[in-house]
Amino acid sequence: MTTEERFGPNDVLTTGQVAKICNVAPRTVSKWFDTGQLRGYRIPGSKDRRIPVQHLVRFMRAHGIPLGQLDSGQTRVLLIDDDPELLGLLGEALKRTERYGVRTAGGSFEAGAIAQEFRPHVILVDVTLPDVDAGRISRFLLGHGELQATKLIGTSGALTDGEIETLRQEGFDSCLRKPFDIHQVISAIEQAVAIVY
C-alpha cells in the first residue's frame, strides 16, 4: 500500500490501513471502533474489523484529522469487453471527465488480476463474453474483502427483461443494453456509486 494510493467513497478499509492514513497505531483504531466513535463492521466469523471510507472521512473531519489521500474523489472503473475499439473509446471518454480512473480488460481472467490490484469502485462487464459467468463474478467480489463494495454493471446487445432480473438477483446493480452512449454509462456509474449499504 503506497501513500500515493487513492481511496474512493465506496472503499472498505482494514484497521491497519486506517492507522496508516490517520498516522496512529492500529490498536488506537481498534479502540475508536470498539467504543463506537468510528463506525464499521466485523467480518462474519472473524474478529477482523472493516471501516467504510465514508465513515472514516466523517470521523476524520469531526476530529480535525487531515484527509490527505482520501480527498481525491476519483471513481475507479474497470471495463471488461472483448471489443478493443469500444474499450478504447469508452475509456478515453471517461478519463477526459477527470472524475474517473479507468482500467480495461478483454476477459474475466485478466480482469480478476486487475481487480485485485486496482480495486475498482465499479465494474462494467459484457455479460455475453464466452469466459464471463455473472454469478462467478459476484462470488469473486464477495470472496475478496477489499472488493465487496464494488458495484457491477452488466452490458449486452441483447438482454431480455428476464435476464436483467436474473443479473440483479446475482448481485448486479444495473444493466445497459448496447449500443449505449457515454452519458448513459456515466449515469449508470454515478447511480451505482451513490448506493451505500
Image (spheres, rainbow, N blue to C red):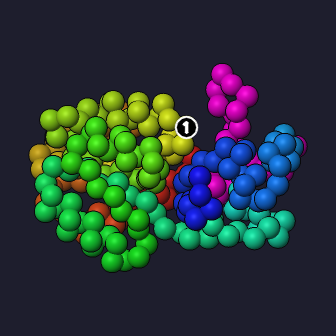
Q: Along the line of sight, which residue is nearer the eye, 117 or 194?
A: 117
Whole-percent x and y of residue 112?
35, 40
Q: Residues within 10 Å of mark 1 (few under 14, many from 20)?
A: some
Image-based side of 18 in relation to 1, left or right:
right
Image-based side of 113 in relation to 93, left or right:
right
Q: Residue at x 27, y 73 (%)?
A: 93
* Quarter of the figure with residue 54: bottom right
Image-based side of 171 in relation to 42, left or right:
left
Whole-percent x and y of residue 23?
79, 59
Q: Which residue is mark 1?
A: 145
Residue 53 vertical position relative to residue 100 in the rendered view, above or below: above
Residue 169 vertical position relative to residue 94 in the rendered view, above or below: above
**Residues rendered magenta in the picture:** 35-55
Q: Amino acid at mark 1?
A: Gly
Q: Residue at x 63, y 62 (%)?
A: 3
Question: Is residue 142 shown in magenta?
Answer: no
Q: Is residue 162 visible?
A: no
Q: Along the line of sight, which residue is nearer the eye, 187 or 82?
A: 82
* Quarter of the figure with residue 43: top right
Q: Secondary structure at mark 1?
A: helix
Whole-percent x and y of residue 70?
63, 65
Whole-percent x and y of residue 22?
76, 59
Q: Residue at x 64, y 48 (%)?
A: 13
Question: Is residue 39 shown in magenta?
Answer: yes
In the rendered image, the residue lying farthest to the front is 2
